[in-house]
Amino acid sequence: MYVCNCNAIRERQVHQAIACGASTPKAIFAHAGCQAQCAKCVCEMREMIDEAQAALKMAAE
Ligand code: FES
């Protein structure tokens, strides 16, 4: 499933970018070697980052 249709960034690629330390949508675009275009996917990327950080926080407790 694509998170970003403009750049063909898949959900799996977003998870990989987050696992590699991306903490902003800009960093996810950089990881994929592209830039935001319409930016419609930014909210979903932020939600994925927040979920990953919440899961890490819970795992650390
Ligand atoms: S859907 Fe990601 S920049 Fe347009």
Image (cartoon, grey):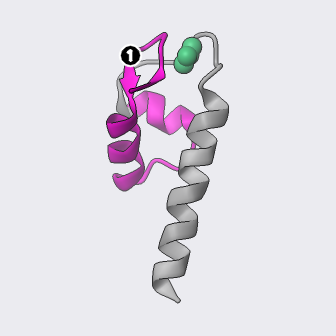
Q: 54 and 28: which one is in front? A: 54
Residue 52 percent location from the top left of the image: 50, 59
Q: Quadrant of residue 53?
A: bottom right
Callout 1 secondary element: loop
Q: Is residue 20 located in the magenta-colored stretch of the structure?
A: yes
* Residue assigned mark 1: 8
Residue in the picture at 42% in, 49% down? 18
Range shown magenta? 1-30
Q: Is residue 36 visible?
A: no
Quadrant of the displayed image that contains ligand 1: top right
Does residue 58 belong to the magenta stretch?
no
Q: List x then y, in percent, for residue 31.
A: 37, 34
Position of the N terminus, as image quadrant, is top left
Q: Is residue 39 visible?
A: yes
Q: Residue furthest bottom?
A: 61
User: Who's the residue at 63% across and 11% down the image?
Assistant: 38
Relative vertical location of residue 6 with respect to residue 51 in this rendering, above or below = above
Give the x, y percent position of residue 44.
Answer: 60, 35
Residue 27: image location, x then y, percent: 49, 38
Please state if 19 lies on the left or on the right of 5 as rendered.
left
Judged from this view, the residue extending furthest toward the front is: 1
Q: Is residue 41 above or below residue 49?
A: above
Which residue appears at 46% of the width and 28% of the height? 29
